[in-house]
Each structure stands twice: as C-alpha cells, then as structure tokens.
Amino acid sequence: MDQVAAQEFVGSWVRAWNAHDLDAVLAHFAEDVTFRSPVAAQLLDGSDGVLRGKAALRAYWAEGLRRIPDLRFEVVGTYLGVDSLVINYRNQNGVLVNEVLIFDGPRVVEGHGTYLGTDADPAGSRSG
C-alpha cells in the first residue's frame, strides 16, 4: 500500500463510520478477519476481546452503533507500514484512539483497537 492508497482507504473508512454504514465499513475487511479490542470484551458477554470472522465483527460493531448513536470520528493522523496502517482518530467524546490494521492485498485481515489506559470504555469510545 502506498500513501495514495492509504489516504483513499482512510477517507472511505471514516466516511463509512460517520455515516453509520456498517456494510461500507465491513467492505474493507476480509471474511476471515481477526479483530482484537478491549471494548469488545466489555460490550459482548463472554468475549475475550478477540473477534473471529466478519460475522462476529458485524455483531460487535452493530452493538457499538446501537449503544453509541452519536458516534463520529475525526482522523488525526495515519501511519503507513509494510502491509499495515494505523489510523489515529478522535471519537465523539474527544478520546484519541488508534486502530492498527494489517492487510493482505486490499482487505484487512487483522485489526486492533487500541486505547490510552482507561479510555477503553464503551460509553466513551466507538466499537473499535
């Protein structure tokens, strides 16, 4: 992924989230994606914070959107690596979050929602 492709991905990603268009968000992810988030452990009963597969990711983010109807992101920065991208954004409560995404071709195969200390609070974060 080059810088242009990264910016296009991030633009599409943030527009989809801000529109609460779950299908558009999930279009960026592979069917067999694995996503890890401390918020998932809090939102989903019995979850260890590891979501396996697009169906599990859909259920998690649908619940997040249900609980956080005013969800909105502002991208602060993007960081490009080898087959990876970090999106640093501010959520609707002003909390800074990083999403670490690992790619296989154009789709995300692994993701990590990361938070500062106690900011991994479902009421103050998004579903990532």
Image: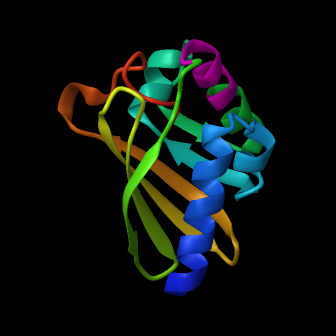
Report the side of 109 relative to 80 (left or right). Answer: right
The residue closer to the viewer here, 94 or 118, is 94
The residue closer to the viewer here, 48 or 16, is 16
The picture quadrant where one finds residue 113 is top left
> Would residue 63 be counted in the magenta stretch?
yes
Where is 26 relative to 116, above or below?
below
Where is 28 relative to 64, above or below?
below
Give the percent coordinates (x, y) of residue 114.
35, 44
The residue closer to the viewer here, 45 or 5, is 5
Q: Which residues are magenta?
A: 61-68
The picture quadrant where one finds residue 62 is top right
Give the percent coordinates (x, y) of residue 15.
64, 50
Which residue: 64% across, 16% down?
Answer: 66
Where is 122 relative to 92, above or below?
above
Name of the residue lying farthest toward the left = 117
Which residue: 63% across, 30% down?
Answer: 61
Which residue: 80% across, 42% down?
Answer: 23
Instruction: Give the main secondary structure of the magenta stretch.
Output: helix
